[in-house]
Amino acid sequence: MFKVQRGYDGMVTKTFRLPEELVKKLLLIAGENELSLNKLVIQCLEYAIENIDQNDMHGNMV
């Protein structure tokens, strides 16, 4: 289960292009949980990395 948490150290600035509908959903979730969009995106990415199917990764990573 995905649990929302707060606070991170050692940040790096990067730019990503995201679909508008996805951003709208993320903003809604962030607002409901009183989080910044940035913190929510970090948590979503961490969750995805921790739960990725290793069998599907081979040859598909950039």
Image (cartoon, grey):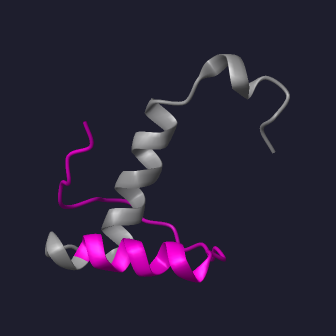
Quarter of the picture containing the N terminus is top left
Toward which corner of the image does residue 55 lie, by quadrant?
top right
Task: Say which residue appears at 16% left-offset and 74% top-offset.
Answer: 32
Give how far across and how far down residue 22 sits, in percent: 51, 72
Q: Which residues are magenta?
A: 1-30
**For the point 47% across and 51% down, which residue is it?**
45
Magenta segment includes 28: yes
From this view, report whether residue 44 is shown above or below residue 1: below
Screen quadrant of the C terminus: top right
Which of these two is toward me, 5 or 51? 51
**Horizontal side, residue 28 vs residue 60: left or right:** left
Query: Residue sitting at 26 percent across and 73 percent down?
Result: 30
Q: Residue furthest top?
A: 55
Above or below 10: residue 56: above
Quarter of the image where one finds residue 53 = top right
Whether residue 36 appears in this view of the structure is no
Query: Does 34 sit left or right of 42 as displayed?
Result: left
Rendered view: 41 above or below 61? below
Residue 32 visible here: yes
How far across and down, in percent of the image, does residue 59 sit?
A: 85, 28
Rendered location of residue 26, percent (x, y): 38, 72
The structure residue drawn at horizontal position 20% and vertical position 46%, both measured from the top left corner, is 3
Nearest the eye: 41 or 56: 56
Q: Which secondary structure class fits the magenta region best?
A: loop
Q: Is residue 39 left or right of residue 47?
A: left
Nearest the viewer among 51 and 15 is 51
Indicate yes or no whether the magenta region holds residue 2.
yes
Residue 41: quadrant of the picture: bottom left
Q: Is residue 50 above or below residue 8?
A: above
Residue 17 position in % (x across, y down): 66, 77
